[in-house]
Image (spheres, rainbow, N blue to C red):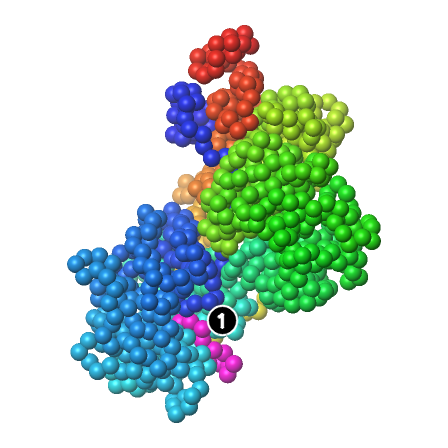
Amino acid sequence: MAWMTYISHWFEQDDCYEGLQRANMSQVRQVGLLAAGCQPWNKDVCVANGDRFAYCATLAIYIYQLDHRYNEFKLHAIMSEHKKTITAISWCPHNPDLFASGSTDNLVIIWNVAEQKVIAKLDNTKGTPASLSWCWNADDTVAFASQRGPLFLWTISGPDSGVTVHKEAHSFLSDICIFRWHTQKKGKVVFGHIDGSLSIFQPGSKSQKHVLRPESLEGTDEEDPVTALEWDPLSTDYLLVANLHRGIRLVDSESLCCITTFNFPSAVASVQCLAWVPGAPGMFITGDSQVGVLRVWNVSRATPVDNFKLKKTGFHCLHVLNSPPRKKFSIQSPTKNHYTSSTSEAVPPPTLTQNQAFSVPPGHAVCCFLDGGVGLYDMGAKKWDFLRDLGHVETIFDCKFKPDDPNLLATASFDGTIKVWDINTLTAVYTSPGNEGVIYSLSWAPGDLNCIAGATSQNGAFIWDIKKGKIVQRFNEHGKNGIFCIAWSHKDSKRLATCSGDGYCIIRTVDGKVLHKYKHPAAVFGCDWSQNNRDMIATGCEDKNVRVYYVATSSEQPLKVFSGHTEKVFHVRWSPLREGILCSGSDDGSVRIWDYTKDACINVLRGHTAPVRGLMWNTEIPYLLISGSWDYTIKVWDTREGACLDTVYDHGADVYGLTCHPRRPFTMASCSRDSTVRLWSLTPLITPLQINILADRSWEEIIGNTDCAVEQGMPPLLCGKVSRDIKQEIEKLSGNPRVKKLRWFSECLSPPGGSDNLWDLVAVIKGQDDSLLPQNYCKGIMHLKHLITFRTSEAQELTTVKMSKFGGGIGVPTKEERLKEAAEIHLRLGQIRRYCELMVELGEWDKALSVAPGVSVKYWKKLMQRRADQLIQEDKDDVIPYCIATGDVKKLVHFFMSRGQLKEALLVAQAACEGNMQTFHVSTPKGSSYSDDIYKEDFNELLQEACRELAEWYFQDGRAVLAACCHLAVDNIELAMAYLIRGNELELAVCVGTVLGELAGPATHYALELLARKCMMIPTCFPSTGYRNLAADLLLMTPDSELQLVKLCAFYPGCIEEINDLHEK
């Protein structure tokens, strides 16, 4: 009963039937978030303090916090209080929980990260707070300035609270780009201007306005904006200044002279941002504006110490953090002798980097790029800790799933790009070439054609061929008028419709031949092809009407005009399940349901408090409709009686697009002006239906026809093509089809995020032939019997890629020359051990190790272990080959685990279990040796430890299904089930447990009990008396269920007749 011990801390063992009286929980569940990228509009949009960093998207601020357990930064909070573009952010130097931010609607907000709430708000500031910073000389004062100034000081609390104007920082002759307070000299502040000059103010000294322009600009009107500005943290007067065209200077703010001008390797390189490296006096880093090159500098040298090309696109801003503390090993370091005797172990110097004189200290750079990418770069290890390569930086107007792949989602944005995302990993896999201006709408080509049509605000429409990576067709029939919607016909891949502000809905072939131009009395905002009649299309118009056209005739007049909305109509959507039914959303805040066959409005859905934009019919439940609005909410409707079943408040701005894929009908994606894409599970809305499948109820209680399903009071039934296809496939199967039925419905109803991976692992455990595994199996968590095979073939593929190596170094000091000469003499005298120790002292480990076997294998192994210990202390990846060569698997696994590289730890442990690691059998004095069986046992324990750690990492990250996958990968069924139950994935636990059989039995029965309780708490959005019977059916599937059935009867809150009926059952 290990699983029960494991979850006993997570579930109270006493009765919870009294929970039946609790309030209903919200039903639609967020299961994924695609964060916005960093905005490229303003300067100070990336900050850090202690173990947190934050960056600004256009409308929201994303705060990441260090998870000390795993040494990684995780998204901690999203601040979305600003309704207009954020201009700047500044972390409070005196309180790590507070930051200030400004926005273009003349607003400054103080936000508490720990409490996630607004502490103070200043609105109606005089001018936009374009630049903003906490004052270093006052605990609760924030300074901000508009482009021309003056500098305002807002004291948030105390007797002097209010806004004052800085006595001297006003009446500038050039706009302010950026300003910085001195961190030590009280009240000292510097401004950088558009014309390239600086203004410096400090109490008790004469004001210096518009000084220190680059020399080549003196006496000209040419502008060279200050792009970055930072005080030297170790000086009261020195200052680093970067100008867009004339590079970086170190200047003295007292003598007003330039100390050093720094030279770039290339004349075309220009600086976008810079930052001092804490803990490394005189060292700073810069980011280039054209290409993502990070350069490391020291003030003592006019040229860069090092250059790293991190990305193709240019930097926007960066900030340096001190490195997170690593978990340390207790490794015995050698005694630090002042000299090396012939028997003592030498003390090695630190490992030298590419440039010995200026090694980069450990530190992380938060890097934000012009394409919205955000990453955390480990400068010491020279690798990304994480990198989100691409991100939309503006409103996302539309999102659609690829017709033949429910894992690919396309998004269209105000930022001029269409991006395609893998929703399992939430990473971008394709982005459209160039910038198309504002993109309002997108539509996939039917099937597997791999093309997307896009509609823009001024540049017409286009077709992007994803595989070719280029725009293959453009349409300009609407001229420069905005195209608000584009729709590729579902039934005829040659037809494409667009509607525009010019009042036309144009139907054309994909090669550009115009078939129809439907003239409207005003702008047309939405259009949608009927999913039942290939020649019917509906439009939404500014004149408040919905029109239906029949494209098979030559007539330009609509077949029907539906009136009723009191403001303009935006989107229209045909029902995929009910012929002749369509809906429309309007600026009047309502959604109307129209019946084409009855020529009438059959329902009005009221509840939104602002214009409606997103609309989506469910492809399985015929009366389920979802809408998104400018009131920031998503609403779920039962269109039979017009009831709102649920309201989702998570978006921070207008909701524009809603979409789902027929193969995953209860996973919805939404997009918004808050620049995020969010994924939702609608499955909780149909819990009774899901439990009917688990309880093996008849098909009549799972699948129905549309006419029956839309009757008032009917519980939900599946009516779509996908569920019908599953039913047909199951009816073809011979023998017991229950296993297939549970898997296929689970894959259909579960959101992305590991359920497919889980079912693949279940199939492997049940003995399925490996050839039947899907192509993408190797990208997820593999069963450990496959792990080494797949990784080996991956390594063979990689060997064909040519890798370039970078070297370098400077002259060797005299002391080293003397030691080298001594070592050579010892070698000639046959004193190999002495030679090795001198080489170690010189840091020449490779030379020492290459001749160490000449002393003995035991000495060589000890030397290898010393080298490994040193590299671990320095947190260097170079330790890996040393540990593997000496068979020190334990050290290597713990090294990976300490760095949070849990998948690497698992891979090494499995390789050791399969006998791929050579272990040295060092004989003991009595001649006995450590047996292979004992080694294997040790390795197996390491493997289980690595697995537990990886599973817990997934679980802490909110991914219970992937945590369960980790345990299934090592055949630990009990713990896999425990993680599913802990993660409240009860339906999935029952499905998987039923298929896995006896080993999962106890956990499956416990999950069934919990589901029975859940049945009795099902929200009454679909009222039905059948839930009590469902709960009883689930309990009857467990052994010794009598006590649970008695409790069910005792706590059932129904009327006397229902209770008697339940007793009989």
Residue at (45, 64) in percent of width and height: 367
Q: Magenta stretch containing residue 795, yes or no?
A: no
Residue 470 seen in the current view: no
Q: Which residue is the site of mark 1? A: 293
The three-letter code of the residue at mark 1 reads Val
Query: Which quadrant is home to the C terminus?
Result: top right
**Relative to 724, is 181 on the left or the right?**
left
Q: Magenta stretch containing residue 271, yes or no?
A: yes
**Relative to 985, is 251 on the left or the right?**
left
Which residues fall within the magenta stretch?
Answer: 264-274
Residue at (27, 76) in percent of width and height: 169
Q: Quadrant of residue 471?
A: bottom right
**Relative to 63, is 970 on the left or the right?**
right
- 120 or 325, nearer to the observer: 120
Please state the horizontal and vertical placement of residue 820, each as a whole percent of the image.
Answer: 40, 74
Q: Is residue 161 above or below residue 1046?
A: below
- How dense is the environment of label 1, judged by Cα within 10 Å: few (below 14), some, or many (20 and up)? many
Q: Is residue 178 above or below residue 1009?
A: below
Furthest residue toward bottom = 219
**Relative to 841, is 388 on the left or the right?**
right
Please state the horizontal and vertical placement of residue 257, each as a whole percent of the image.
Answer: 30, 86
Q: Is residue 214 above or below residue 949?
A: below
